[in-house]
Each structure stands twice: as structure tokens, then as C-alpha cells.
Amino acid sequence: MDLRIEKTEKAIKNAFIKLRAKKTLEKITVKELCAEACINKSTFYAHYADIYDLSESMEKETVMSIINSIEHLKDYTFENMDAFTRALCLAFLSQISLIKILFSGKEQNHLANQLDRELKKVIFRKHPEFENDFEKNILLSYCIQGAYHAYLNNPEADTETFVRTIEKIVKCLKPML
């Protein structure tokens, strides 16, 4: 990528994060984002259709970053879902500052839904036989979305307590499969 384009992208994203940390997505205007990023509107529109396009792009990047940070993702099976869930929790906790900004307000459920969809794609590429198995799909959704929502409702829990508790819950589910 051209260095100028890379610098512009970085300026846009940094400005967006700064503004998004202060206000809801709906309240951010292209005009104020451009002022914050020190670019003109035409430059912004050369990169994104609107603020929502930028937000969606950054959400997708964050989801892919979380997924890519899960070591040995393709090695996890339904036999070691507790280890998978632990790795997932640690992966999203490592990006929690950005998550709290990008996925706040009305966007709060977007992360869980996007993680659910994208992780299933990765898992089902390796195990296509599970794609139509409702029990496996439900368990995956429960592990992915349940862990995220448990964190949202218990942000004061320390990392080790949180991750250990989620791991225990998932271990209890194992006999059900």
C-alpha cells in the first residue's frame, strides 16, 4: 500500500476512535472527523462511503484481529471446547479497550454476532461435517456469545477469575455432546 494512503487511513481511523470514545456513532459527522484527521471530505469519501462504512470496516478488522490472535485455532475441536473458549476470552480481552469504543451503545451486540459468524466459518472449513449439526452450532454460539456477554455484565471481574469461570462452565457442557 502506498505510504500516503496508509497514513491517511491511520489518520481517519485514529480520528474516528477519538470521536467514537466521546460520542455515539450516530452523532459523529464526516465534517468533524475530517477536521480531527486533518483531511478534506473528498479524501474521506475516497476511502469510505460514510461514517457507518468506516465503523463497519473497523469492526471487521477488530474481529479478524481477535480471530487471528487465537493460537492454534484450527486445532480446537469439540473435545477441547474449554481450551477454545479460554483462548477466545483471552483474545477479546487483549483488545478490550478498542472493543469498548467500537462496540459500545447500539453496536454492543455486533462483536458477539460477528465473532460467532467468522469463527464458525474457520471451524467449519476444518470440520464441514459440523456445519449442519444444530447441537454443535448451539454450543459454539453459547461459548462465543456467552463469554462475551458474561464479560459485558461482569467487567469488574479480574481476567483470571473471568476466564477460569467461563472455562469451568464450558467443561460442564462437554458431557452434553
Image (tube, helix red, strand yellow):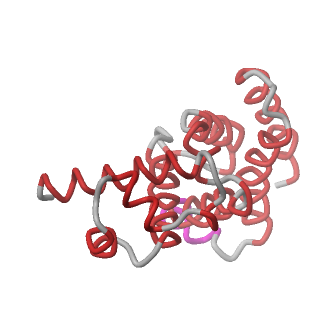
Which residue extends farthest left? 2
Instruction: For the C terminus, give its image quadrant.
Output: bottom right
Compared to residue 139, the image places residue 73 above or below, namely above
Prevalent SS, magenta region: helix
Query: Which quarter of the figure has residue 117?
Result: bottom right
Position of residue 37 measured from the top left corner of the image (x, y, whole percent) = 35, 52
Residue nearer the viewer, 142 or 74 = 142
> Magenta residues?
123-130
Query: Which quarter of the figure has residue 35?
Result: bottom left
- Residue at the (68%, 41%) spot, across then down: 85
Position of residue 45 measured from the top left corner of the image (x, y, whole percent) = 33, 75
> How many numbered discs sit on the rendered protein?
0
- Residue at the (66%, 58%) spot, across then down: 24
Query: Which quarter of the figure has residue 2?
Result: bottom left
- Residue at the (78%, 33%) spot, across then down: 155
Position of residue 94 measured from the top left corner of the image (x, y, whole percent) = 55, 33
Residue nearer the viewer, 135 or 44 = 44
Q: In the figure, is residue 154 to the left or right of 76?
A: right
Q: Is residue 132 magenta?
A: no
- Residue at the (52%, 59%) spot, across then down: 59
Q: In the figure, is residue 22 to the left or right of 8?
A: right
Q: In the figure, is residue 42 to the left or right of 111?
A: left
Compared to residue 156, the image places residue 38 above or below, namely below
Position of residue 93 measured from the top left corner of the image (x, y, whole percent) = 62, 35
Instruction: For the N terminus, give its image quadrant.
Output: bottom left
Q: Is residue 129 magenta?
A: yes
